[in-house]
Amino acid sequence: DRIGLAAGIAVLVVLSCGFSVVGVVMILCWAPKCGGSGLPESKCYWNGSNMPSFFTVRNLIVRIFTSILANAAGFPVGREGPTVTIGGNLAFLVSHRFTMPYVKQWVDLSANVSTVIVEEERFAHASRINCAVGGACAMAMLFNTPIGGLLYMFEEISPAAWPIELTFRAFVATTVCALSSYILLGAVNKEVREFVIFAWLPEDKEWSQGDLPVFVVLSAFLGAVTACHTKLMLAMAAYRQRQKDRMRYPRLGVALQTVAYCALCAIVSGVASLASNCRHHGDSNLQYVRFNCPEGEYNPVASLLVNTSHSSVKLLFSGNNDGEILFRSSALAFVTYFALNVGLAGLPVPGGAFTATMLLGGLFGRCVGAILREFGFTAAVSGVYAVVGASAMLCGFKQMAAAVVLIVVQCVNDFNMTPVVMLSVSIALSVNRAIIERGHDEEQIERKKLPFLEPEIPHSLDCKVAGDLCDTLPMEAELRRQATVDEVLAALEATKDKHWADFPVLDAGQCIGIITKAHLTATLKAHGAGDPPGGGASSCGGGGGGGEEAPAAEEEEAPTETAALRGS
């Protein structure tokens, strides 16, 4: 009121750009792997692949702060993806600290030399389970749904890579996480309702059989829209990557692009909000954004755009604010947010699109519901259509079914909506998969060429046998049961340019076991052989996703004879 509308928007742009500058500098200079949700890399690790230097202390700290800054700057992102990655990162580090002593053992290499050997497979298995538990806890905390967190992680990992013991561990962990959040918030006189999407009061969510045909058409349409949305985001990311490759100073160029796009988001959201008419507060007592309106009024578009995605989804899902958000406001906000969300792809911003796609679907569904109600074609409140739209858009983007149903139904706190949401998910997901084969995260894994083992065997392997897929090992890489130091050095030298993680141990021409590159490296160091060829532990070993090198051997006395190398 004191400085005027133009000055207020200018201040909004300056603050947004300030937050984005700090965030992009932290990412580009200290933790480049934090420039995204982190879910593609996390999925690969949960799948069984190694993600070197991904789950580190530095990445954890940077991701926490930059995720906060990205939301404060007003980027059209959600916080689910980074939060799940943060939970997995924290769990990995805790596991690394407390599990390592239980997987170490001393081995006598000779009468004078002992070394520490790490049970890599056991350690990797424990780390992956704990990392998945951390991700489930993060999702449970965000939506205040322990079962939803478990089910989300189950669909994220897929049954093919889901260990049997993980189910109960995630169940216990998400329960403890939910109770802990209640206790901690109570200690500072806060309630969980302030931070999650949840309808605490009874709301009007009635629908009739006459609404079902509209639900079907709406879900099918949004299933197709979600496929287009995913393709546009991937195309934008590829375009930005080509731009980066042509830049003389890539870091500076990407940083300027990110800050400029942040300013664009603030300006476009502000201008779109100015196109909306102010409205008087209704009886819902929901929190709207005043923006340019007089005291006692609010701006509907600003309440949807100049706000966090969580807060906007709350407004859309409500069954008590019918008539407070007109279809024109929802349509304008949908077009604006859709364009800004697609344009963000490829920039180093640590944000996900979970609630962002919920918001897009909710906006379109609310618009359709408001039009039908205004012209008397339905008696259902537009909030019901927002729930249907959000479910359809979210399931298509994530390629999930059961987790989407549970989380959305929990958000509206009305299990009578379950059949409708299941119908919406079934139709939208079917249409989406007919247009695009994989979800957004899976497409990123493919385009980044990340190591990921698909649950289904590709058709190109139908006529293959195991022998056709075996790599040819150099003769030097085949170790005898009693190998000399020179033979081990020759084996490492012959494979230094290849990603060999394991070496066969032969006895009388028969393979009697396998020894890892990390164990060979540790043994050579124990014998004072210097830095072995290949630079130490292989990144393809089973050691874990944190990129930690295999622990070096600890020498007790100078070696006097050849080490005995045995297969595991």
Image (spheres, grey):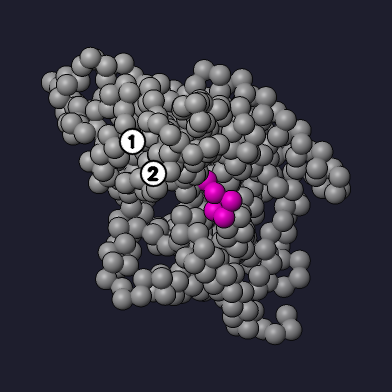
Q: Is residue 347 above or below residue 384?
A: below
Amino acid type of disc 1? Val
Q: Which mark is residue 506?
A: none
Q: Is residue 168 above or below residue 311?
A: above
Q: Residues within 10 Å of mark 1 (few under 14, many from 20)?
A: some
Instruction: Say if the magenta span includes residue 368.
Output: no
Q: Are marks 2 and 1 in contact (CB under 8 Å)?
A: yes
Residue situated in front as seen by the camera: 469 or 131: 469
Q: Which mark is residue 529?
A: 2
Image coords of residue 8 (percent x, y) = 64, 79
User: Which residue has dot 1 on it?
Assistant: 485
Q: Magenta stretch?
A: 55-59
Image coords of residue 70 (percent x, y) = 56, 61
Q: Is residue 35 above or below residue 19?
A: above
Q: Is residue 335 left or right of residue 326?
A: left
**Element at badge 1?**
helix
Does residue 324 show up?
yes
Q: Is residue 173 left or right of residue 360?
A: right
Farthest residue in the front direction? 560
Does residue 433 show up?
no
Residue situated in front as seen by the camera: 501 or 117: 117
Residue at mark 2 to residue at mark 1: CA–CA distance? 8 Å
Amino acid type of disc 2? Ala
